Amino acid sequence: MGNLITIKDASVRFFKEKKVMKSSRNEFIALRNISCQICEGDKIALIGKNGAGKSTLLSIVAGIMQPSTGSVTRSTDSISLLSVNAGHFPYLSGRKNVLLHGLLLGLTKKQIQEKMDEIIEFSGLKDFIDDPVETYSSGMKSRLGFSAALFSSPKILLIDETLSVGDAEFQKKCISTIEKKLVDSTYIIASHSRKSTDNICNKSLYLHKGKIEFFGEYNEGYDKYEGK
């Protein structure tokens, strides 16, 4: 992972700085006694109320954050974390962000350039692709991230609430593309919308106050979450 260390170090420092800003008297434990095995090919809906620990869990799985206790074992470095609030390089253009994203996933520059037109077309950002990402709205960042990740076909795709950002038509297009292009991939989608994961997930992981309430069959987990 030598080619990833600089980017990951920057991400780790970002999260550490946020943590330092909090007083030690207000220390918050985001996750407690988390233990589960996610198998290759699992399609998981990560559910729970705001503050349940979903984003923290995804960041730990991605390797952006390190757990204070315990460990995470990953079978691959081909992992992509999609989040509205992280994962972009604001001063670079959308095009260069796509290039970097692909390089981090292990693709060659030639492979990315061969997919570039298709990625830009899918994102709908042709008129803005050479503008700095810091000028993009949350919806535009979501479109860029989704497009780059889906067409780079990572072995593990982690999606943190980005399905809730952007217009309904683009969300529908993303879900359809996930079904078609990521058949062999493993993915975890954090979402409050059962409708957005019904056709693409086969398991659910329900977090409550940092603990696993349920991990197993998709509908059973959602029923518990919704109190049915």
Image: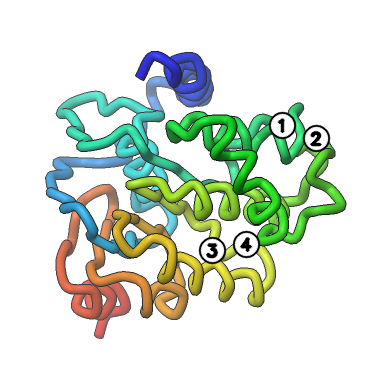
In the rendered image, the vertical position of residue 41 relative to residue 27, given as above or below: below
Determine the secondary structure under disc 3. helix
Q: Nearer the viewer, mark 2 or mark 4?
A: 2
Residue 5 percent location from the top left of the image: 43, 16
Residue 132 percent location from the top left of the image: 80, 35
| Residue shown at the point (15%, 67%) measured from the top left | 216
Q: Please tell me how crowded label 2 is: few (under 14), some (14-19), or many (20+) other residues with Cα within 10 Å.
A: some
Q: Amino acid at mark 3?
A: Leu
Residue sticking out furthest to the bottom: 228
Q: Earlier in the sequence, mark 1 or mark 4?
A: 1
Q: Are marks 2 and 4 in contact (CB under 8 Å)?
A: no
Mark 2–mark 4 Cα distance, whole angstroms, equals 20 Å
Q: Earlier in the sequence, mark 2 or mark 4?
A: 2
Determine the secondary structure under disc 4. loop
Q: Earlier in the sequence, mark 1 or mark 2?
A: 1
- Give whichever of 154, 5 is nearer the camera: 154
Disc on res. 215: none
Q: Are marks 1 and 2 in contact (CB under 8 Å)?
A: yes
Label 4 sits on residue: 165
Mark 4–mark 3 Cα distance, whole angstroms, equals 6 Å
> Which image quadrant for residue 130?
top right
Label 1 sits on residue: 90
> Horizontally, is 138 left or right of 218 in the view?
right
Label 2 sits on residue: 132
Residue 94 percent location from the top left of the image: 73, 40
> Which image quadrant for residue 193?
bottom left
Q: Please tell me how crowded label 3 is: few (under 14), some (14-19), or many (20+) other residues with Cα within 10 Å.
A: many
Q: Amino acid at mark 4?
A: Val
Q: Are marks 4 and 3 in contact (CB under 8 Å)?
A: yes
